[in-house]
Image (cartoon, grey):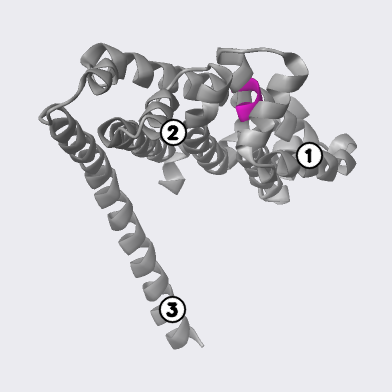
């Protein structure tokens, strides 16, 4: 039995090492790929013989404004989801609130299962709002599930023996949560935040339908006016932004997680 266990342990160690090497390689390649992709498409667009309509959208000022607006929507959504999802996930793992967890997770699942454009339009029709918050609030509902679910799963996955040990040496429940449970759950929580941010970047292209701005304006303009350079540039900028924020999330997971789990 011992002889069989040694090769199995060696194989597991090799698999972990291979995964870590692949993660490090991706951290190096992904931002380069995003920059090359975006740079190549911008070079293609600006070297074309653009007509007057295309020049209105494909200029430095318009592209920077659209990209910045898109990034603002994504970051505000992520901040809102973090402020709501992480504390709510913590509460739902407490003994006195565990029965309510399926209800909140079910609501969050419904929010993500509903088509994003449907949530945006429905919120607009009900509230009458336009602009940033008309986009941010429904998108936050759409992207809440990964953060809420990962927070709950991460905290429930903490070894109860560690919690009991902390309470046994005199720690309060709040101290156990702060010094034991949350640090061990950080990798899953960060993974949920990363997923939410990438979703927010993608769904933010729909903010144009409620006058929220962002890169969706370029995509919508290019589609409606049959201007392929405008459409392709807006789409590729959104893809490049998603790749970059996903990379930043991976970096955060690597450096903010517990040192023993890196």
- In the rendered structure, the answer to whether residue 71 lies left or right of residue 133 reads left
The disc placed on residue 8 is 3
- Circles 2 and 3, Cβ within 8 Å, touching? The answer is no
Residue at mark 3 to residue at mark 1: CA–CA distance: 42 Å
Q: Residue 168, image x and y in percent?
A: 75, 38
Q: Residue 194, image x and y in percent?
A: 48, 37
At x 42%, y 16%, the residue is: 69
Q: Residue 89, image x and y in percent?
A: 72, 35
Q: Residue 188, image x and y in percent?
A: 56, 43
SS category of the residue bearing label 3: helix
Magenta span dominant secondary structure: helix
- In the rendered structure, the answer to whether residue 204 lies left or right of residue 254 reads right
Query: How dense is the environment of label 2, judged by Cα within 10 Å: few (below 14), some, or many (20 and up)?
Result: some
At x 75%, y 43%, the residue is: 110
Segment tinted magenta in the rendering: 136-141
Residue at mark 2 to residue at mark 1: CA–CA distance: 30 Å
SS category of the residue bearing label 2: helix
Query: How dense is the environment of label 1, judged by Cα within 10 Å: few (below 14), some, or many (20 and up)?
Result: some
Place residue 46 in its image quadrant. top left
Query: How dense is the environment of label 3, judged by Cα within 10 Å: few (below 14), some, or many (20 and up)?
Result: few
Place residue 186 in its image quadrant. top right
Question: Going from the N terminus, do you reach mark 3 or mark 1 first?
Answer: 3
Res 86 seen here: no
Nearer the observer, 213 or 172: 213
The disc placed on residue 256 is 2
Question: Going from the N terminus, do you reach mark 2 or mark 3 first?
Answer: 3
At x 61%, y 13%, the residue is: 130
Res 143 seen here: yes
The disc placed on residue 107 is 1
Relative to 102, does residue 135 appear above or below in the rendering? above
Question: Going from the N terminus, do you reach mark 2 or mark 1 first?
Answer: 1
């Amino acid at each position: 039995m011992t002889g069989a266990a040694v090769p199995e342990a060696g194989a597991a160690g090799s698999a972990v090492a291979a995964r870590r090497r692949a993660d490090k390689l991706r951290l190096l390649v992904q931002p380069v790929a995003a920059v090359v992709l975006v740079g190549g498409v911008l070079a293609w667009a600006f070297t074309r013989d653009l007509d007057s309509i295309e020049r209105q959208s494909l200029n430095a000022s318009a592209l920077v404004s659209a990209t910045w607006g898109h990034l603002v929507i994504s970051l505000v959504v992520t901040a809102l989801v973090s402020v709501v999802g992480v504390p709510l996930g913590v509460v739902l793992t407490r003994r006195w609130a565990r029965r309510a967890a399926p209800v909140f997770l079910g609501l969050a699942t419904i929010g993500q299962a509903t088509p994003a454009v449907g949530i945006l339009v429905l919120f607009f029709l009900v509230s009458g709002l336009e602009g940033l918050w008309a986009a941010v609030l429904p998108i936050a509902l759409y992207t809440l599930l990964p953060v809420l679910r990962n927070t709950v799963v991460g905290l429930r996955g903490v070894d109860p023996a560690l919690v009991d040990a902390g309470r046994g040496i005199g720690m309060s429940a709040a101290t156990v949560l702060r010094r034991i449970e949350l640090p061990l759950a950080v990798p899953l929580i960060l993974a949920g935040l990363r997923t939410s941010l990438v979703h927010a970047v993608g769904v933010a292209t729909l903010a144009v339908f409620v006058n929220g701005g962002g890169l969706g304006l370029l995509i919508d303009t290019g589609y409606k006016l049959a201007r392929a350079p405008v459409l392709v540039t807006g789409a590729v900028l959104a893809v490049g932004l998603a790749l970059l924020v996903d990379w930043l999330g991976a970096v955060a997971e690597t450096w903010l997680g517990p040192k023993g789990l890196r």
